[in-house]
Amino acid sequence: MSAFSPICPAIAEYGASFKNAVELYLDKVNADGGINGRPIKLIVEDDRNSPQEAATVARKIVATPGVVLTIGSWSTTASLAAAPIFAEAKIPQISPTSSHPDFTRQSPFQFRQNNTDDVLAQYNADTIHKKLKANRIVIPYSQDDWGVYTVKATTAAIEKDGGKVLLTEAVIPGAKDFRPLISKIKAANPDGVFIALPYQEASIFIQQLRQAGVNIPAGGGIPLTSPKFIELAGKAAEGVVVHSIFFPGDPSKKAFVDAYQAKYHKLPDQFAALAYDAAGVGVAAISRVVQSGKPLTGQAVRDELANGPAYAGVTGVSKFENGNVKKDPTFLVVRDGTFQLLQQ
Amino acid sequence: MLELFASQIVNGLAIGQVYALIALGFSLVFGVSNLINFAQGALFMLGAFIAFTGVTTLHLPLVAAAALSVAVMSLLGMLLERLALRPLENAPYIAPVLSTLAISLIVDQLAEIIWSPEGQAFPVPFEEVTYFFGSAYITSTDLLIFGFGAAAAIALTLFLSRSWLGRTLRATAQDRDAAAQLGVRTSNVKRLAFGLAGALGALSGILVALYFKSVFPQMGLPYGLKGFAAALLGGLASTPGAVLGGLLLGIVETLASAYIGEGYRDLVAYTLVLVFLVFRPQGLLGDRRLDALGGLGGAGGAMPSTSVLSSSSSQRKATRVLELPPWGFLAVGLALALLPVATQNAYVLQAVAYAIIFALLVASVTLVSGSLGILSIGHMAFYGVGAYAVGILARNHGWPAEAALLGAAAITAIIAMVAALPLLKLSGHTAALGTLAVGQIGYLVFMTWLDVTRGPMGFIGIPAPRLGLLGGYTLASLTQKFCLIAVVVAVGLALAQRLLNSGIGRVWRGIREDRLAAHAAGLPVRRYILLGFALSGLLAGTAGGLFAYVQSVVSPESFTVSASILLLTLAVLGGLGNLTGAALAGFALTLLPELLRPFAEWRMIAYGVALLLMLRLRPNGLLGAR
């Protein structure tokens, strides 16, 4: 089994929780004697969140004998670059976090653990329009696969529900000075902003927005559920509402949260939870193959993943339909420097 | 509408003063040592992080942490001068520039290792206040930056123009030897300049950290480049010019962001730099007195020369040059094409394929930087043009591989030639800055021209190469693609070597050694320079096309300016102007990091150290500069 994810540059925070969670799950399985006494071996590769590195790393993984399942990568872009290589080698690929609908359309070997952007777009619209009651909305979005699709689908969802999107603006990865954009936002006079940016850009954007005296409600999607967002944005993060399919404060997830915290001394985030479930659903499929006595191949594991029973994990229930899942959202709000359940 | 415009101007001034502050450090060093200090961005980043550590780990108050950072950075600035520049005083003119590049590679990567690659929140001890004027606003941090920036600029101007020490600084810049004869301790003077540059770097780093309320190890390069651009717009050696250039840059890019789109701000900023290079290379407030003395090196050297390889103490030394004859490349290429017989391991083949492509790419860099003597810090742009061109021709228009590769090479050649037009009037370090702007513009165009390149999402689905001449035979597997690459690169390198051995190559080297003399000898210098760029573009475009075929996905982050810097490093390591050396360095140093994948984060540091050592011990490169 192998996992690949960014361990280097700006995305490292995501990559680390990803790797930690997979290792945590496999340690548990191996401590319990592995599958029928056979331990599962994990190979971890760093793709630096670059499609080029993802393709190189994928080649390296498929050239390693005995790999029957791979978990990765973090972004849709990197996952897409690796997908044809895994499809060709007939090794199933579970991306815990890639949300672009195109990913699972690549071949029958692609699976995901989170909702697709079509589902998420509705949750985005719910966050800003239903929960935060904004009707005149602006959306800054990051200029990558995820951002471009998200802004399109979210705008459609908001307008279907009767809201209005006044302004959408593409932001290049790594941008730091948002004041021109904020002056434009002020001029448009919205009553809500939905932030479709990675946490690093989002944390600077929200600080500069509040600094400019724009105190309209702000909502965000999955990237903002990272604790790093609150750490970087500080006071400006207060009151931001996000939706998530995992919340560490939920008592039913205590076993996972405690184990993760005991080992890594920090709370697991949504990415960790998704990666944990990706490992869980994958190991379940592998052990079903072993139990059935069939030879353990990538093809056999894929068939078990696609046709197997529903798997209840820490982020909800996984039942694959064309490689996709549908999980319910939890709405959270930043209060006193932490995420708390949104009371309605 | 007008109110919005006014508030955007205010926004532009706010970010512009940040750029101005960074630009001051550049213009100080340039004014004193005629050196473009690429390490200034690294000093700036390091200054911010030392203050960050002071506040968070040592629990110092901000003022004390800032003072500590300024003190440490002044020392580090002097250390930089002592370790990386003093030993190169009599080395080729190109050596100090490359040395600062190497230092910035090392420092940037070390910072990622020490402080983690993540951004961190910079604790701001005071409550920030925002002042509103209609829809425009400024913050207390803006005022703080303005206060410190203005104080630094005025103090620096007074110091340089009024004090005795300042005058010795300027005298040393004009003519080191004459200043020394008049009793100025020139080595102390230079050290002082770098100490001041370090202090300015720290100051600007801390203020920028306050502005964004966070610090990032990656902030050195982008803000360093902006600082450069600002210094260039203002006139490289002028203090008021740096301030003016920074403000102009800030306003222009803010307006671009406001009225064209947030994604276009950098594109517009670097286009402005290029426009300035063409029409007013001396900048807003600069003058061209030094140029009249025979280029930037002219004032200090024994004989005026435009050569990047000659030094101030002498024309260049004779060195032994090791190179392959043209047929040698064919033989090596053929041998490599047989590698799939030995191994079918896809990972090995892919890694070697990239290495072969890089051999051709570095060769294209050495053609311009070595033989023609125009340092290119933007070659990745040409590589990228080739890659996207093959993608478009093969995927959208269904061209066979031969036609797509030739088409891509031709398109790149034309673009390289057009890109060379603004560089024709420039020489030495200014030309290097021009190529830097070209490289940055290329990257930003790949990033923002979504209709064609899909920007950061990557251009996907490039089909496997189909050979039209062999009746549409498709090279589907990696093994087959590998053979195509080996053959194409070998033929490309053999032809290029043949060219360098011919009269054309000799003329190029003549232009490099002395452009004025070549001109006086009746050689059409401009035409030869354009030809050089076109042929270099041809090679780089071919390499890019092959890259697109192996990769089947092309995305802009393969074509960044830092990658271009790396290419130049490789060309220098191999020996400038030496095609064999370039190909060898490109091949070996692309393959090596694959073997050392677990130590990936040390890769850049190793390159930096290797470059520093090479400049000290073998300034003409591994196989000798030709």
Image (cartoon, grey):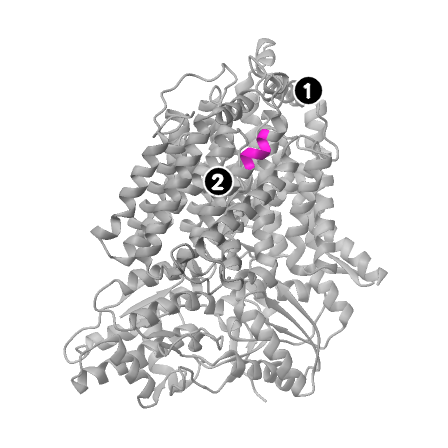
Where is B473 relative to B284, above or below? Answer: below
Residue sitting farthest toward the top = B181
Where is A234 relative to B377, above or below? Answer: below
Residue sitting farthest toward the right = B2
Residue A185 at x, y = what percent?
Answer: 72, 68
Range covered by the magenta-colored residues? B528-533
Residue indicated by mark 2: B104
Front residue of this view, candidates A276 and B59: A276
Q: CA distance from mark 1 to mark 2?
A: 31 Å
Instruction: Give the amino acid type for the residue marked by disc 1 in the picture.
Output: Ala
Q: Is residue A282 magenta?
A: no
Q: Nearer the viewer, mark 1 or mark 2?
A: 1
Residue A55 at x, y = what percent?
Answer: 38, 61
Q: In which quadrant will I find the N terminus of chain A?
A: bottom left
Residue B51 at x, y = what percent?
Answer: 53, 47
| SS at mark 2 in the image | helix
Mark 2 nearby-residue class (10 Å; few <14, some 14–19, many ≥20):
many
